[in-house]
Image (cartoon, grey):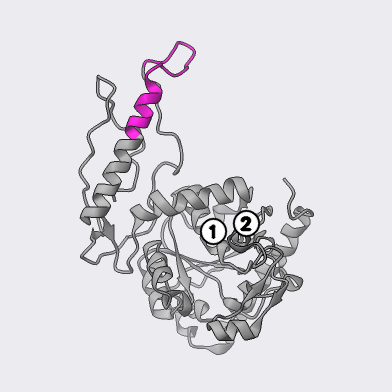
Amino acid sequence: MTAEPNGGPPPVSPNGGPPAASPNGSAPGMTGRSGAGRLPGGSGAGPVPGGSDVVPVGGSAAGGPAVGQRGDVWDRRVAAGLAFLRRRLSGQYEVDEFGFDPELTDQVFHPILRMLYRDWFRTEVTGLENLPRTGAGLVVGNHSGTVALDALILSAVLRDQHPARRYLRLLGADLVFRVPVLSELARKTGGTMACNSDAERLLAGGELVGVFPEGFKGVGKLYADRYKLQRFGRGGFVSAALRTGKPIIPAAIVGAEETYPMLADVKPLARLLKLPYFPLTPTFPWLGPLGMVPLPSKWLIEFCPPISTEGLADHADDPLVVFNLADQVRETIQQTLHKLLERRPDPFGP
């Protein structure tokens, strides 16, 4: 996969010039833009994105940078950027059968999300040891915040902080895939429709799959109802986990509720625009485009111990089993939210 770093800096030519761009070889399980393939396991192990690729070349005895090193660094960055643009324009990049484009995700989308969750939201993550290092798992989170930033932040956190740097394949609502530009972006970043067939295919392929069963009921709830989980639908995510025998990992996210606090929902305008809700927040629509800037709340994310579904495939269509397991997941997330809120008394603290 062309976007994956090789764990070290590219070679530097003797004259300090930029290195030659490496060929864009295809990764196993992937195909070119015109084909369809799979991303096996979804682990994508490698160095942490955003980490420095600078190694002192001829630095001082104290380890300081050499005089010409800054120029070398920028030369490499410019060369890497031009090589990236050349691959994009010529179609020499890979996507899987769902339309997932790992290179575009790593090079364009995740760096933006990384700045948000590290610097703007000051996110603290716990419980990463509860996620499978390899193999499939279903990550189930609470949904909130008017704009579904929580799902995007969760995917970037996993890519950066999971020991194997895994991708999280998000399941999205139908509306997401009916909007032309949004649909393309969702596919490119690894998303697919929240239906059992797609979820089961991803789980069977060894992927980490992310689902938010509250849907628009969670994202579109008022600020007065913050951190009160809504109904989990019909439990389709449980059926997918049962049929494939993969573990369910509840995830509790605190902080998203305060990014765009919804004070009111203008339902007539929402119906007119064919939207699930039309929010009024302290900044939107009063400040125009500036109202889309999220408030800098403090985020806490905790991955809870996994819930095993092995040996329960025969109960995938049993409504009682599905309901009880969905209720167990919901209660686990709700109790973890209460615990995290006690740790974070000030929503905008350090």
Q: Which amino acid is tagged 2?
A: Ile
Q: Taking 68 as reference, is 76 above or below it?
A: below
Tell me, yes or no, if residue 318 can be seen here: yes
| Relative vertical location of residue 291 with respect to residue 199 in this rendering, above or below | above
| Residue drawn at point x = 54 percent, y = 64 percent | 151
Q: Position of residue 298 (x, y in %)?
A: 68, 52
Q: Can residue 234 be seen by looking at this rendering?
A: no
The magenta span reads: 58-76
As displayed, is residue 255 above or below residue 112? below
Q: Nearer the viewer, residue 330 or 56?
A: 56
The quadrant where residue 340 appears? bottom right
Q: Residue at x 69, y 61 (%)?
A: 258
In the rendered image, residue 70 lying in the magenta stretch gets the answer yes
- Of residues 305 and 269, which is closer to you in this image? 269
Side of 101 where 208 appears, left or right: right
Q: Nearer the viewer, residue 336 or 50?
A: 50
Tell me if 148 is positioned left or right of 180 in this view: right
Mark 1 — residue?
A: 154
- Is residue 246 toward the left or the right of residue 98 in the image? right
Res. 301 mark = 2
Residue 329 pos. (x, y %): 61, 72
Horizontal and vertical percent position of residue 169 = 43, 64
Q: Residues within 10 Å of mark 1 (few under 14, many from 20)?
A: many
Query: Crowdedness of circle 2 by 10 Å Cα count: few (<14), some, many (20+)?
Result: many
Residue 321 position, x and y percent, is 57, 84
Dot 2 and dot 1 residues touching (CB under 8 Å)? yes
For residue 231, what is the image quadrant? bottom right
Kind of residue indicated by mark 1: Leu
